Image (cartoon, helix red, strand yellow):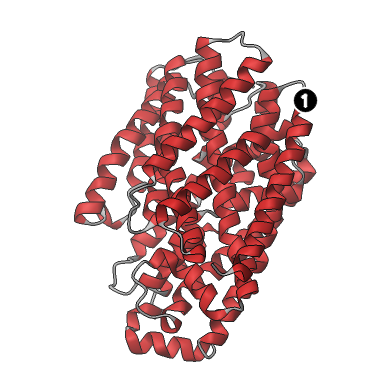
Amino acid sequence: MNWQVLVPLLALLAFIFLIGIWSNRKMQQSSSFLTDYFLGSRELGGLVLAMTMAATYGSASSFLGGPGAAYSIGLGWVLLAMTQVATGYFVLLVLGKKFAIVTRKFKAVTLIDFLKERYESKPVVLLSAFSIVIFLFSAMAAQWIGGAHLIQSITGLSYLGALFIFAIAVLIYVIIGGFRAVAVTDATQGIIMFVGTLVLLIGVIIAGGGIPNIMADLVAENPNLVTPYGHDGSLSAAYVTSFWILVGVGVVGLPQVAVRAMSYRDARSMHRALIIGTIVVGFIMLNMHLIGVFARPVLPGIEAADQVIPLIALETLPPWVAGIVLAAPLAAMMSTVDSLLLLVSSSVVKDVYINYMKPNASYQHVKKVSIGVTAVIGVVVFLMAIDPPDLLIYLNLFAFGGLEAAFIWPIVLGLYWKYANKHGAMASMIVGIGTYIPIYQYNETYGHLLGVHAVTIPVFLSLVAFIVFSLINKREPYYF
């Protein structure tokens, strides 16, 4: 084992666990376990809100899968990935103040709490919880796999051993600390990612002999690597444009991101987060994906593209610097997986168990069930991650698309359209999920239907379904 690399990583984990212990002590003083455990008592300031959104969104697909795809496909994937720059800004702009006000009025702890109060429909709640659990299992599996690959590349342990270490660390941390620990740690992790990606990009450029030399090497290998169309010309203008629906507009429908818009302290915090979050996400995404492309001439022939970041860091940086830099993707994966764990746990505990099975549960009972469900979910995801796919990014993007197809219109139109009702919401979710899965499978087998990403058609069809069924079953206009 390379202890010069491991020591910074272990120091980061120790710091994270200290934050978890601090958060647990604050939680003991809270009058509402659910609000504190799942929302941090709605106390997030601007910097913490921006960083927790960036760190949650910047996951294994961003730090391992994204650079891996860029390594394989070329600069075209960098262009595609940069559609994510406006993500945080767009989410807070669309949801922002109104969503926070409404969810406070509803006393909503989860996204499904909002849907329950807005549509007053048990089927909407149950379908929402089912969708979150099913699709977020895929997203969480991607983080588990990414964390295991990273630890494996650093320590030389077997994949299964590395997976076990990562899973245990995350589960203990989340169970101890809850949302507050996740959010505060995200602020630290966001700073690590911001600095770490810049250091690694500089190291790769120096190792490659400068940007002109790297570009010349790429052109010599395959001129398509430096075009917007990818190494094999598969990135069409229609596909790249439609990708913005997946990682731009549609992110409003991601429960793990939307819940952040429920948790900030005041309007000033939200406005500050708009600016900070946009800058941080853009900077990190550009650096990470450029590293993936620029690593190709420096380390040619990497078969497991998802491991390009740890391999290039160990190749181009001094060991102790590599350890600090590799804390960035590990931080990203931990922050994402702990957020997703809390989201799935809250869907099961708050939205199904308490709402419909035991509404009068005591504080201690709710606490035990929440922690127990979180642990069980972690074990299930661990089992799913034992046999990983070739590229993590596709597993993560599959989950993104499914959640967006299900939730984007029930959230947005539920906030802004007074005639939105439960019939439209149910129709939208059924049509969105029901068309997304077969189209995704078709695209995997035969290529992109109509040349666009699989989420594009379901998002438009679910919009039509929402409007049509809301108007067919028109009710009195809804006012908050």
Residue on which the image places disc 1? 30
Foreground residue, 423 or 12?
Answer: 12
Residue 437 on image: x %, y %: 29, 40
Residue 246 on image: x %, y %: 44, 50
Q: Residue at x 60, y 42 (%)?
A: 94
Q: Quadrant of the C terminus?
A: top right
Image quadrant where residue 99 sits: top right
Foreground residue, 395 or 94?
Answer: 395
Residue reaching furthest to the left = 446
Q: Is the residue marked by circle 1 packed among few (<14), some (14-19), or many (20+) residues within 10 Å?
A: some
Above or below for 249 versus 115: below
Confirm whether residue 118 shows in the render.
no
Q: Residue at x 45, y 86 (%)?
A: 215
Confirm whether residue 230 shows in the render.
yes
Image quadrant where residue 479 sits: top right
Above or below for 380 versus 58: above
Residue 376 on image: x %, y %: 48, 30
Q: Amino acid at mark 1?
A: Ser
What kind of element bears circle 1?
A: loop
Q: Is 140 left, or right, of 358 in this rendering?
A: left
Residue 11 on image: x %, y %: 69, 58
